[in-house]
Image: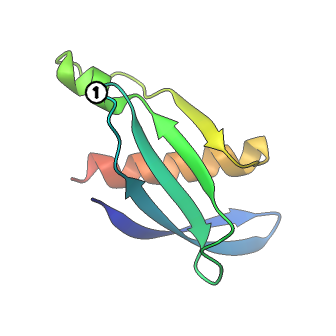
Amino acid sequence: MLNFPITILLTNKRYHLTVQQVPSDSRNLEYFKVYPEANRAKYVLIHGNRPLHVRMGDPHFPIYWGIEEGDLSPEAFEKITEEIEKRLKNL
């Protein structure tokens, strides 16, 4: 399972977050728990369909992201998913 830190900038403030891949029984989706480094209890669960594209042989197709649990502003959601995608491309 993956576990890595990310930093996003929102309204001139830096947020240091941890991204943790969560085990899933789905063949088409993967789940990531995103939480502040200082408070693991406050988290958002995000899913992406990257495993579907990899299984179908097209790993470069854009990933569809969604929020499974929690609440995020659209700007924060976009920045977090961009950072996750950057990390996944470097694997």
Q: Secondary structure at mark 1?
A: loop
- From the viewer's perspective, tell me whether residue 20 is left or right of residue 91: right
Does any portion of residue 60 appear in the rendered image? no
Say above or below: 62 vs 69.
above
x, y (%) of residue 36? 63, 73
- From the viewer's perspective, tell me whether residue 57 is left or right of residue 18: left
Circle 1 is placed at which residue position? 27
Who is closer to the viewer here, 37 or 9? 37
* Mark 1 crowd level (few <14, some 14–19, many ≥20, 10 Å Cα): few
Amino acid residing under circle 1: Arg
x, y (%) of residue 73? 79, 47
x, y (%) of residue 16? 60, 75
Residue at point 30%, 60% (across, down)? 2
Who is closer to the viewer here, 37 or 11? 37
* Tally of numbered discs: 1
Q: Quadrant of residue 46?
A: top right
Residue at point 47%, 62% (across, down)? 19
Quadrant in the picture for the N terminus: bottom left
Residue at point 28%, 30% (across, down)? 51
Say above or below: 6 vs 66.
below
x, y (%) of residue 85? 41, 45
